[in-house]
Amino acid sequence: MCAADSSPTSSISSPKRLQHAKPTNGRARKGSRSGSLLGHGAGSPRPSISRQPSTVTEEDNGKPPRDYLILAILSCFCPLWPINIVALVFSVMSRNSLQLGNVDGARRLGRNAMVLSIVSLVGIIKS
């Protein structure tokens, strides 16, 4: 039983596994496409690259986030056409994210659509 523990194959394989998890050249290696880093646990002081869902705030009240599609369509009649199109695209992307269950992404994209639509509407007053 002791001979199996001190076999050369078990002592050789364990350092190789640890070697792959270590950072190389002082930089951490990416482990997957999701942005997680190898060698850093959940309690690590290093920040994570991947997005984490935000906690539910009091402003939610169980309502789905707005996509501002009507505002984005109205802004399409303004003379700032590149901003109008981007606002419309953000609004549609917000609606699609909500249908897929990504509430945080829908809220972020909806907010971007609202801001760009308002910028476009203010642009009609300035011109």
Image (cartoon, grey):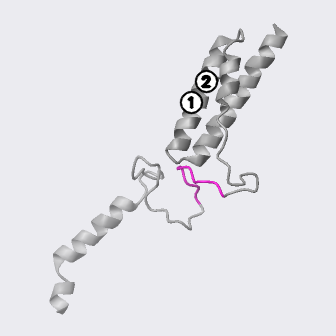
Seen in the picture, residue 123 relative to 56 is either above or below; the reply is above
For residue 119, side relative to residue 97 (left or right): right
- Nearest the eye: 83 or 15: 83
Seen in the picture, residue 84 relative to 50 is either above or below; the reply is above
State the residue position of label 2.
Answer: 88
- Amino acid under label 2? Leu
User: How far separated are the C-alphas under marks 2 and 1?
Assistant: 6 Å
For residue 63, side relative to residue 89 (left or right): right
**In the image, what residue occupies the spot 57% across and 36% down?**
95
Predominant SS along the magenta part: loop
Q: Which SS class for mark 1?
A: helix
State the residue position of label 1.
Answer: 92
Q: Position of residue 17 (x, y in %)?
A: 30, 65
- Residues shaded magenta: 46-55
In contact (CB < 8 Å): disc 2 and disc 1: yes
- Nearest the eye: 30 or 83: 83
For residue 109, side relative to residue 58 (left or right): left
